[in-house]
Image (cartoon, rainbow, N blue to C red):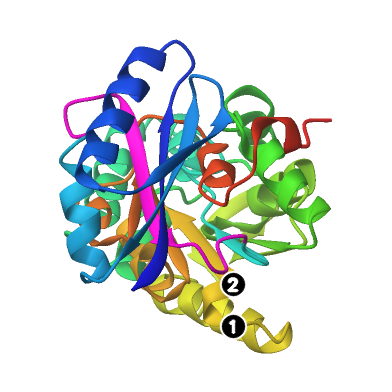
């Protein structure tokens, strides 16, 4: 029998739904117990199980399927992670930077359609990125600063997630198929230890329509996680990866806990855990942090 924990998380104001989901899970998990992580917001249910973890996850997910409640099921041992590898666009920030850049060229609708197909896994990421960048040829580089200052917003909970994990000894890496000018800025703003991204080429103050090769995509994101595991001497179980798009699937699948965050259907279906309703602080509750342990300043 394995010691397991199911963490149920609801947005503030949904205490009744959280209570209902908790009661359903407790009834199913005979002999289990519940512990509050944040009143009306997050609950841990400790239990033992001998069924395969994917089967247990799928069964417990049915109890919250119609409720605005997220559930994360995992082994109790090692649930506090020592490494987080995170996607940026539509994960740590609320936008897709390349789509916002395209808006300054009057091409947002066209570029966003390609982005959506790539994130859904309908087309390969690398050629899709080359195609989108080519469309931005001759766009003034100054548009990057305007996007950063006028369009980009952090997803709620981003700073608390990184600050809390780092305060407890973990490392955080931002790895993005986006561009260095955006990624380095966001990494510094949020507090990541490291960042990896793609390089946009420019000349005479304008984009050339070219991107550095090799392109950082699905394979490189996985390699970043694998390299960090070796560099920091960690067990795979001590790691967490989070993202929303198809190019995040490999790292999500390899991490000790892989989380699909407000993700595309293909990603949500494949990940060990999914956060559909809550902000990034859900990743702290999933690790057993109580609300009063969050670092918010």
Q: Position of residue 284 (x, y in %)?
A: 59, 44
Secondary structure at numbered mark 2: helix
Q: Could you tell whether 119 is left or right of 139 in the image?
A: left
Secondary structure at numbered mark 1: loop
CA gap, disc 2 and disc 1: 5 Å
Is the C-beta separation of discs 2 and 1 under 8 Å?
yes
Q: Which residue is mark 2?
A: 238
Residue placed most toward the observer, 297 or 100: 297
Q: Is residue 275 above or below residue 279?
A: below
Please check the rendered image and state whether residue 58 is part of the magenta-colored stretch, yes or no. Answer: no
Q: Quadrant of the N terminus?
A: bottom left
Q: Could you tell whether 136 is left or right of 22 in the image?
A: right
Can residue 199 be seen here? The reply is no
- Residue visible at 52% across and 75% down in the picture: 237
- Residue visible at 65% across and 47% down in the picture: 182
The magenta segment = 64-80
Please give the count of numbered marks on the rendered protein: 2
Q: Position of residue 259 (x, y in %)?
A: 41, 55
Residue 235 badge: 1
Q: Position of residue 71 (x, y in %)?
A: 35, 42
């Amino acid at each position: 029998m394995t010691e397991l924990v199911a963490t149920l998380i609801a947005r503030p104001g949904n205490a009744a739904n959280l209570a209902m989901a908790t009661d359903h899970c407790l009834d199913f998990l005979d002999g289990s117990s519940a512990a509050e992580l944040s009143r009306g917001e997050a609950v841990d249910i400790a239990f033992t199980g001998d069924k395969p973890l994917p089967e247990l996850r799928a069964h417990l997910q049915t109890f919250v399927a119609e409720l605005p409640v997220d559930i994360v099921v995992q082994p109790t041992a090692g649930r506090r992670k020592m490494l987080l590898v995170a996607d940026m666009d539509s994960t740590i920030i609320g936008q897709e930077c390349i789509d916002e850049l395209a808006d300054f060229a009057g091409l947002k609708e066209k570029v966003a359609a390609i982005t959506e197909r790539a994130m859904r896994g309908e087309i390969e990421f690398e050629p899709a990125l080359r195609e989108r960048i080519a469309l931005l040829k001759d766009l003034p580089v100054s548009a990057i600063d305007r996007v950063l200052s006028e369009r980009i917003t952090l997803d709620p909970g981003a700073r608390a997630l990184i600050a809390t994990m780092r305060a407890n000894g973990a490392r955080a890496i931002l790895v993005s198929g986006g561009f260095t000018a955006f990624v380095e800025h966001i990494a510094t703003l949020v507090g990541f230890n490291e960042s990896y991204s793609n390089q946009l080429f420019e000349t005479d103050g304008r984009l050339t329509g070219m991107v550095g090769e090799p392109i950082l995509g699905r394979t490189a994101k996985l390699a970043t996680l694998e390299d960090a595991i070796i560099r920091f001497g960690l067990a795979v179980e001590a790691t967490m990866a989070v993202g929303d798009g198809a190019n995040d699937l490999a790292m999500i699948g390899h991490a000790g806990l892989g989380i699909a965050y407000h993700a595309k259907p293909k990603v949500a279906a494949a990940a060990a855990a999914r956060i559909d309703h809550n902000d990034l602080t859900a990743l702290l509750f999933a690790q057993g942090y109580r609300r009063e342990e969050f670092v918010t300043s």
